Amino acid sequence: MPDSNLIETVRVELADRSYDILIGDNLLMQAGEKIKSVLPNAKCAIVTDENVAAIHLEALQENLKAAGIEAKPIILPAGEATKSYTHLQTVIEAIIEMRLERGDAVVAFGGGVIGDLAGFAAASVRRGMNFIQIPTSLLSQVDSSVGGKTGINSPQGKNLVGAFYQPKLVLADTAILNTLSAREFRAGFAEVIKYGLINDADFYDWLEQNWDGIQEGGEKRIHAVATSCRAKAAIVARDEFEAGERALLNLGHTFGHALEGITKYQSDVLVHGEGVAIGMVLAHAFSARMNQSSPDDTVRVTNYLKKVGLPTDMSGLRNHVKTADQMMDFIAQDKKVSRGNLTFILTHGIGQSYIANDVPAAEVHAFLTEILES
Ligand SMILES: NC(=O)c1ccc[n+]([C@@H]2O[C@H](COP(=O)([O-])OP(=O)(O)OC[C@H]3O[C@@H](n4cnc5c(N)ncnc54)[C@H](O)[C@@H]3O)[C@@H](O)[C@H]2O)c1
Ligand SMILES: O=C(O)C(=O)C[C@@H](O)[C@H](O)[C@H](O)COP(=O)(O)O
Ligand SMILES: [Zn+2]
């Protein structure tokens, strides 16, 4: 896999809570120095999962030690089920047991599961400790480590308990993705494709041409990660708390989150990025059904997701997803619901997503019934 000396910096502009996202190959080897530059005297709790710990924890610990940073790990099981009340309690109590102070730091070292959970713990212990993100999956580098959404799942729905809490620094080592499984790389790529579909048709065209290069690593991968982070940072800077525009980042998520809930957050059945891939196809198909976009766009998106190796329909989930009512139960718990009315992210075409308020539940129900009964 090619390495690159290129380091991209994306700034998330949030007044006195602004921070940098550093993106480049082998940045893990600069973790101590970079953390010191934003938090000169902090001790750290490194929250990670068993998979990441087995491959990369020793390197991080050595690097922090060499920089004179005292750090202890908290190692959790891997997978979506870890974003739970039980594991939140484990992390919080471990941090308190370590006697870390408010000025010390929680370092999330893993994918989005670890980032969301550790971030919520950081927001909660002593009402807010310093927080650093070292995302190790493609999904966490392009999406979950940026913008400050933290939290856990509940049986009733995804991310229903959480807080907005921004990190002080994001360190995305793009070479660390070389140890990620092909399935998880594809899942993260669904969120990359999402940025093209939201508001950047040129980026979508580029992605269609460059899937091989992005997998290979080096400059094309760095470009894909940096472009995604820039897109997200721009939206978050304008609408940190999702009063409006930020909801666009939820393209594909209302359907996707329902599928994750129905499948009970079992990563062997469905991971977040796969749910988002299916959800984005459903969002395009529903938009076409509502005469908002051309069915040709649904075909184009479906074909590209298939080429990447992502699921594009619910056929693989038939043991779990049986009725539209099942889906509607989760959709009703979506955080975009306002006074009982559904909000969906729909589209007028590639790169032309928009926020649709007051979408009739009966239309969504009929659409899902047609698909599930076909
Ligand atoms: N906060 C946000 O804005 C936001 C945005 C998008 C997604 N999310 C959340 O992120 C979560 C999904 O994140 P994810 O896809 O990273 O899942 P994940 O954290 O479960 O990581 C995926 C898998 O890859 C493994 N892994 C991670 N890095 C690795 C590496 N470098 N080498 C080998 N294995 C590695 C993990 O152990 C895990 O098994 C979901 O809970 C989703 O809701 C949050
Ligand atoms: O950052 C955001 O805003 C997003 O919506 C990004 C999504 O990719 C991410 O999955 C997020 O966690 C979903 O947020 P939620 O508010 O729908 O739980
Ligand atoms: Zn997502």
Image (cartoon, rainbow, N blue to C red):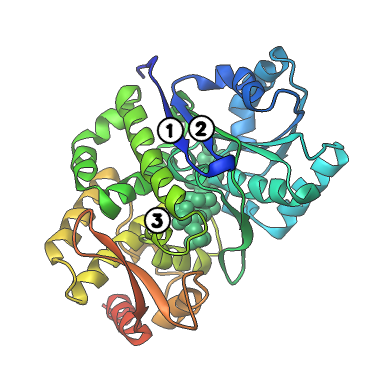
What residue is rendered at 23% in x and 34% in y? 210
What residue is rendered at 52% in x and 66% in y? 261
Q: Give the CA distance from mark 3 to mark 1.
A: 18 Å
Name which of mark 1 and mark 2 comes first in the sequence. 1
Q: Is residue 213 above or below residue 369?
A: above
The residue that disc 2 covers is 20
Residue 308 seen from this side? yes
Q: Is mark 3 within 8 Å of ligand 2?
A: yes
- Residue 249 badge: 3
Q: Are marks 2 and 3 in contact (CB under 8 Å)?
A: no
Q: Quadrant of the N terminus?
A: top left
Q: Are marks 1 and 2 in contact (CB under 8 Å)?
A: yes
Instruction: Find the residue positioned furthest to the front.
Output: 15
Q: Amino acid at mark 1?
A: Val
The residue that disc 1 covers is 10
Q: Amino acid at mark 3?
A: Leu
Find residue 356 and report its image quarter.
bottom left
Q: Position of residue 279 (x, y in %)?
A: 35, 62
Closer to the observer: label 3 or label 1? 1
Q: Quadrant of the C terminus?
A: bottom left
Q: Position of residue 121 (x, y in %)?
A: 71, 49
Name which of mark 3 and mark 1 comes first in the sequence. 1
Disc 2 residue crowd, few under 14, some 14–19, many 20+, Cα 10 Å: some
What residue is rendered at 59% in x and 22% in y? 34
Q: Secondary structure at mark 2?
A: strand
Q: Give the CA distance from mark 1 to mark 2.
A: 6 Å
Residue 261 located left or right of residue 285: right
